[in-house]
Image (spheres, rainbow, N blue to C red):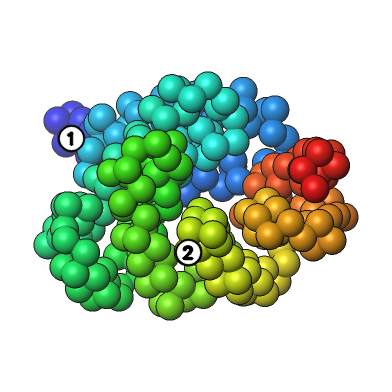
Amino acid sequence: MKLRIVFAVTMSLLLGACSVARLPESINAAIVNNPDLDTVEAGLPTYLLTLDGMVENYPRNVGLLQTSSTLYGSYATLFVEEPVRRKAMVEKSYQRASAAYCIVKKSDCDLKSLRFDAFEIHVSAIKKPAEIKALYMLGSSWVSVIQENSDDWNAIADLAKVQFIMEHVAAYDATYDNGQALLYLGVLNTLIPPSLGGKPEVARAYFEQAVAVSDGKNLLISVFFARHYARLVFDQELHDHLLQTVIDADPEVPGLWLQNVYAQKLAHQLLADSVDYF
């Protein structure tokens, strides 16, 4: 009897561990491949709370931390309009990504506090796939924090570090995350107006490369190309062409379906208000 009980408990623990290991991948796949924005908006908070509980129980599970970071960031970006709430969510996204990075890279856990020269040395040494993933997720969540604190010069001062992260990831693999490292670089290079030393043509090159490496399937790239570059340089012809291409595209791409539907929604909105912009 005792042996059967021990065996049952052991199997229960093993199955539980396997479930935790599979949970991040299955949750993420279920969400990114669901094209119904309303359903995801209504259902995602349940996943977020579930992940909070799982992270509480497994605080050093990198997969759980990274999935939680991704989903909090995505939910805030796609669905949350109230500034205070959105800022809190992107901060949680960053904290989860930072915790995951610290587990993966113990030697330079407090990357953010490093002087830029030391920061470059540490980031340049990152080569392993798991480390690249942790670095990329840290950088992408960091971008959102900067955007939500655009009135804070301490946050703006971190732009150079985030840009260096994305440059390193793009140099490692230009196709990384369907070209989104290049997308971030395009956006980052449009944040400063040309009159103040910005380089919009550098941004355009990044956007065009991102479209190319994703084979045009990542529709969000073209939307951001239109919103952040074409509007910046007042190129209405390019702006309208990019958005119409997004609207006409088939959004059903594995891993990008939800994001592409959201991109098409944004494209319609940007075209509708372009009359007042140009």
Q: Nearer the viewer, residue 34 or 105?
A: 105
**Disc sitting over residue 103 in the figure:** none
Q: Which amino acid does label 1 sit on?
A: Val
Q: Position of residue 240 (x, y in %)?
A: 83, 55
Mark 1, other Cα within 10 Å: few <14 / some 14–19 / many ≥20:
few
Callout in the foreground (2, 1)? 2
Q: Which amino acid does label 2 sit on?
A: Gly
* Separation of residues labelled 2 and 1 (CA atoms): 68 Å
What secondary structure is marked by label 2? loop
- Say if 91 sits above or below 244 in the image: above
What residue sits 25% from the left and 37% below the top?
Answer: 58
Q: Mark 2 points at which residue?
A: 197
Mark 2, other Cα within 10 Å: few <14 / some 14–19 / many ≥20:
few
Q: Residue furthest front?
A: 195
Q: Name the residue under label 1.
A: 6
What secondary structure is marked by label 1? helix
